Amino acid sequence: MAALLGSGQAVAQGNAAKKGSTDISQFTSVEPSTQQQILRIPATHTFQMLVQAGSPYSQAADGVIKEAFDFTGYVPIYSGKSDNKGNSAFGQDHNAQGYLSINHEGSSTATSGVSMLNLDFNQGKQLWDVTAKNAVDFGPVVGTYNNCSGGVTPWRTVVTCEENTPTAPTDSNGDGYLDFGWNVEIDPATHSVKDHDGDGTPDKLWRMGRIKHENIVVAPDQRTVYEGADHGSTNSFVYKYVSDQAGQLANGTLYVLKLSGKIGTATTGTWLQVPNSTPAECSNTTDLARALGATSFNGVEDLEINPVTHQIYFTAKGPGTIYRFTDSGNEGTTVSDFEIFAGNTPTNPNQAYTINYGSGEVSELWRTGNDNLTFDSKGNLYVLQDGGRNHVWLIRASHTPATPAVELFAVTPAGCEPTGMTLSPDEQFMFISMQRPSANNTEVMVDAAGQEVVFNKSTALVIARKEVLGKATKKKTSQQQVAVDVYPNPVSGAEMNVQITHPRPEAATMQVRNRVGKLVLEQAVELKKGVNTLTLPVSALQSEQYYLVIKTATTTTTRPFIKQ
């Protein structure tokens, strides 16, 4: 089926899509629901599938791309070319060509690692071409383990983060450092690990510490780095690393944050220096930080820097909370303005936000599991959820705890966790992955390239507004395809929502049949071109599985649902 995008008609509202805009952050929210088998994004947007797990690498000897896609980092290639007015030319510069680094959060060295894709934007087709798929060789650093999130540096390398380690720590090469639990820097052009000490052998970033790494973010000074540990309720610390030399992460000073009081009331804190001079110290970062009295935040998942205010934001997955603070800089040892920015709080552990999805409003619980964070240049904050309903949220730059400005960008496919994400420099394209959707998903979507996509394995995507992605194929697919979504599913109330994206005005009937095919309900409707949001009365139905059949003169579409 065609991509099922947004709920209802786009209507005028403060943050709704602006006519002619190609800024990906301009949209009307989708209607909240449980995960369906398909991806639901705003009606103004579309997606292109770039790669799925099991796809062969360009070099046959490397095998196939592994499962468990996580951090999805786009690294632009700068050509240095410009037009006769001194402006970067789209077809020659960083918005049109780059590398896509995809982490594999496996549970062994064999299933962990990083894939590096070469991408080119085809201006004529308005589609991304994957010109090469390479596996990063971690053999020289004894492999990697559980590559979770990561970061793209200002000097256009990728840092992949090892979140977990095997039960029995080892030092298999005898260099004094335990094998796993580190940050690792990759040159995307050569898809290889960097050599930091010039001895001809790649190295992991020992001085940044051995912890349950989630991600890193590098400040514009190219020296200050923030990182966090997803280590439960007792060892989930926030760290700052200040490198000795800009653009070089091999050597530097490591700090851990200690608040001046309890979480929720403390507004200031102090950076405490963590010893990191010897292999033994670097290998025992967590124990050393805990001994210093560092504050644990119960599952630190991601830290990012607001490009407008320069404050530091981070998530705590356990309580479902986003915090922010002001740092005193690479030479400073204090933080101020520490506060809860969004999500659940100690006094309101069930925070809900009002979502305007165009044809109505609904209160949606925030829930726990806020995971990856991504800022755009205007200070809008995307939040990807690993838990709850696995949504992709957008918190507008105007948001405050007292005056919320929260929207819903995506309802992701059944069974998956959304991971990534990064934006292209012009902020027209979003690169994101769907990690491990249910293998039982069977519904077919048609992407901007006309490819049939089933979300039943890890999938890396690029999402954009329809004006800039797949324009050449849009007419063809819109004429041929019908998309249907039913929600909530299972349904326990008196009505079920039915959303039908149809290519033309046409009369239709909605039939409900039971498991043996008996007709139990029928309703006539008039479909308009585009998105149709309808309701179906189901209060009289008994608790069991049914099939909704939507028939027109030219199409028949079936969707299963459960009445509770």
Image: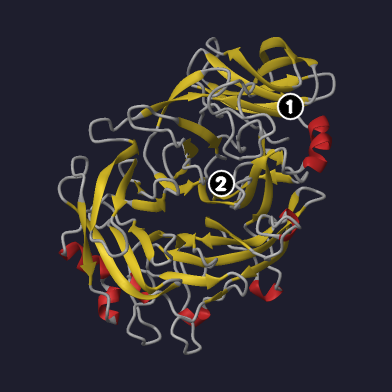
Furthest residue toward bottom: 199
Local secondary structure at mark 1? strand
Label count reads: 2
Compared to 502, does 161 lie above or below? below
Compared to 284, does 326 lie above or below? above
- Residue 530 location, x and y as percent? 73, 24
The answer to whether any part of residue 169 appears in the image is yes
> What number is the disc on residue 557?
1
Local secondary structure at mark 2? loop
Query: In the image, what residue occupies the spot 18% across and 44% down?
Result: 266
The part of the image, by quadrant, that contains residue 476 is top right
The part of the image, by quadrant, that contains residue 402 is top left
Q: Which residue is mark 2?
A: 437
- Residue 455 location, x and y as percent? 63, 45
In the displayed structure image, the side of residue 341 where residue 520 appears, left or right: right
Furthest residue toward front: 85
